[in-house]
Amino acid sequence: MFQQVQKFYSGTIATAAKTARLTAKRLVVSVLLLCIAGPAAAQMQHRIKDIADFEGIRENMLVGYGLVVGLNGTGDDLGSAVFTRESLIGMLERLGVNARDAALDTDNVAAVMITADLPPFSRQGTRLDVTVSAIGDSESLLGGTLLVTPLLAADGEVYAVAQGAVAIAGFSAGGNAETITRGVPTVGRIANGAIIERELDFELSKLRSVKVALRNPDLTTARRIASTINTFLKAPAARSLDPATVQVAVPDSYDGDAVAMLTDIEQLRVTTDQVARVLIDERSGVIVMGENVRISTVAIAQGNLTIRVTETPQVSQPNAFANTGDTEVVDRTTIEVDEDADRRLAVLPSGISLQEMVNGLNALGVGPRDMITILQSIKAAGALQAEIEVM
């Protein structure tokens, strides 16, 4: 009986030890995988289609001028909006109606500008959305209908024609004592309100070479894109022309099918690189700094002289039922001077990271406005290793 119990416990202990060894091995493997994947994860890669645009694949802006009719008394005043009056008269004359009368007066018409984006490779007969914006003194476009309006591109040619009921998200209502306005009632939208009448002549599939335009120009990123494309195509087909352009020659394997090549190329992943830059918006006090911003050793002290003057006048008057004395106002002035004596000189060592620099400036109690001045002063001293761009 004792031997059976001893054998049972010996087997249990051996099994437990084996399980412990397997768990330890798995833990070591996991740690090694994390160490290997750590540096790779630190450098995030992006698809080429997310950081660059391809030649010929772009939108074109369209614009037009038209009239919106059917408004419920919220249109332009023909007396002050001369362009609306002349446009209305010209439209009626084209329809065979003589409207040149000094007594012409209506408040149900508004002059508007039509804007739209022509998608790339749009075909004749397809539809696109348009935006309608009042340019006169119209109060609202609610319930209005846009009349036939040609939409022109930068070359002066008509590429689409718009017409339809205008839908707006805002409204305006009021009376003699109060007015309520929600949203912007003078801007509306017509879903599928334009029909494309002209196509852009561009054959992407027949290109012998394609240019890739970087959205954030950078020499290193352009070179990496060219190297990644060449590795994928197994041929020296791509080369960087400048920080913003990479030219790719269509190889024989994709002869006559540039679309298939671009489809494969846009999925490739590249590690981007950017110049260390600090963006400053003086109007709103917004500061944006890239992760590569570094500073050399510099000492910073920040303080302001604040003088606060407070007036608390008091009324001095005689006692009740007194026969003598006058009531007078006595001035009481309190002056406080704050020289920020508790502020100290702080030293920021060389090569610190962005987070450490922000923590150091925050420790001085520096606000966004003062931080802008400090960053510009550090740059002037030659200690900021980054570009400063004021928006």
Image: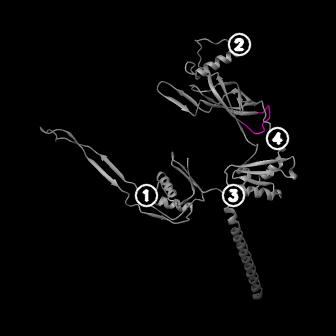
Q: Quadrant of residue 77?
A: top right
Kind of residue sitting beneath label 3? Thr
Give the mark toward the camera: 2 or 3: 3
Magenta-drawn segment: 118-126
Do the residues bearing badges 1 and 2 touch, measured as CB atoms within 8 Å?
no
Q: Residue at x 50, y 54 (%)?
A: 376
User: Mark 1 sits on what residue?
Assistant: 302
SS of the residue under disc 1? loop
Q: CA distance from mark 3 to mark 1?
A: 38 Å
Kind of residue sitting beneath label 2? Gly
- Is residue 119 shown above or below 359? above
> Is tag 1's residue or tag 2's residue first in the polypeptide sequence?
2
**Which numbered marker is on residue 96?**
2
User: Mark 3 sits on what residue?
Assistant: 220
Residue 303 x, y percent position in the rendering: 41, 57
Give the mark toward the camera: 3 or 1: 3
- Near mark 4 (Cα within 10 A), the count class, few <14, some 14-19 or many ≥20, is few
User: Mark 4 sits on what residue?
Assistant: 203
In the rendered image, the residue lying farthest to the left is 323
Q: Is residue 221 left or right of residue 237?
A: left
SS of the residue under disc 4? loop
Q: Residue at x 58, y 15 (%)?
A: 105
SS of the residue under disc 3? helix
Give the mark toward the camera: 2 or 4: 4
Do the residues bearing badges 3 and 1 touch, measured as CB atoms within 8 Å?
no
Q: Is residue 200 left or right of residue 141?
A: right
Q: Is residue 93 visible?
A: yes
User: Would residue 313 be counted in the magenta stretch?
Assistant: no
> Is tag 2's residue or tag 3's residue first in the polypeptide sequence?
2
Kind of residue sitting beneath label 1? Gln
